[in-house]
Image (tube, grey):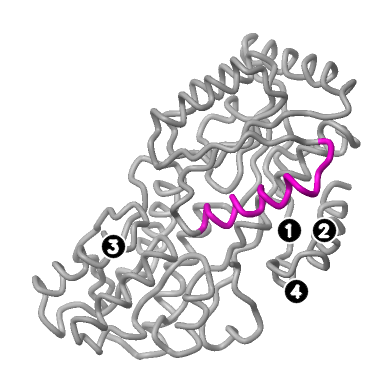
Amino acid sequence: MIQAEMKKFIQRRKSMSKRLKSTAILLVIVSMLVCACSSGGGKADTEKTEKKTEDSGNKDKITVGATLSDFTISFQAAMYNELLDAQKEYDNIEFILQDGASDSALQVNQIETFITQGVDAILINAVSDAVEPSLKKAMEAGIPVFAVNRSITDENAYSYFIGANDTLSGEQMANCLLDMIEKDQMDSCNILYIQGVIGATYQTLRQGGFDSIMDEKGYDMGVNILERIPCKHDKETVISSIQNMLNKYPAGEIDAIVCEGPDDAVGALQAVQSAGRTELVGKIVGMDMPTEVWDAIKAGKIYGTVLQDPAEQCEVGIKTIETYFFGDKDSLKEKFIETDLPMVTSENVNDVTPSW
């Protein structure tokens, strides 16, 4: 089974790479079988992709066009570093690496160029759903698409998705906030909600998951969202935005800050500390766990986060590509290869290691 193969592969790579955690995140396979599309066009696209794969199967080496949403975002930078490692470790795969720079139009051009170049596969961490038509064009040209980390809405625009369930990640962020409210015995909780990239599928799903838990029980527990602030995971934007909010809302009017990304949480902590708003230190909930967040949780400066590993997600994506072209392709029955999303607070932070 592909699940067992992936686990063995990850353990083998972890023993070789000092960057990766010694404790593996459990891979959970969601049963979403690749089915024939209801439309004739979808079936034709699948047949074209399979035909190109058969042709590529005769090669000793394939070329993969890889475009990540933004190299300057720490999470994607960890994925980029994983691809650089893969350049050295895989003799049978050549990567063309491109930075999407949080620009959908730029990433569309990169995909179009990949198609023109005739790459064998595309690995993408999408900026937004705006890239879907180009990805479908790649599929129509017989180029399989492997989406990593960020969800893509149209299932006809990709062959496989490897990563976390973005709706679940938002739910876990909400659960982390509610855990803090219960432990601190808070009767009410006015929050600032720091958003990532508006329009990106992952952000829409993540916020939707958070809101669903608020609707279910959060609002009944006294949660009130004061402001939603889009910051594109840019730490300096987060700092300036929160500084503005701290000027707008004096001490006692903000009880917590919820962030959709790790740089957001680090920026939020810097902002409240610089402003001398000590009542908000330890009242920050984030997403993802680089070393800075891990250290802050241990120190009691960030309450908690939701753990996912960018390097591991990218690693599994690369292995999936290798299996698709050089291994047992029939073992790749699941379209959605999902990774775990445990919540991390001071209670279990010593049991896990940073993702990067």
For the point 57% across and 48% down, the residue is 149
Quadrant housing the C terminus: bottom right
Q: Mark 4: few, some, or many residues within 10 Å (few <14, many ≥20)?
A: few
Give the Cα separation between the discs numbered 3 and 1: 34 Å
The residue singled out by tag 1 in the image is 27
For the point 28% across and 72% down, the residue is 223
The residue singled out by tag 4 in the image is 22
The residue singled out by tag 2 in the image is 7
Query: Earlier along the polypeptide chain: callout 1 or callout 4?
Result: 4
Left or right for 90, reference 168: right
| Residue 256 placement (x, y as % from top left) | 29, 77
Q: Mark 3: few, some, or many residues within 10 Å (few <14, many ≥20)?
A: some
Q: Nearer the viewer, residue 210 or 287?
A: 287
Query: Earlier along the polypeptide chain: callout 1 or callout 2?
Result: 2
Instruction: Check disc 1 and give the amino acid type.
Output: Leu
Viewer-side label of 1, 2: 2
Left or right for 158, reference 180: right
Give the Cα separation between the discs numbered 2 and 3: 38 Å
Viewer-side label of 1, 4: 4
Query: Earlier along the polypeptide chain: callout 3 or callout 1?
Result: 1
| Residue 15 placement (x, y as % from top left) | 83, 68
| Residue 21 placement (x, y as % from top left) | 70, 71
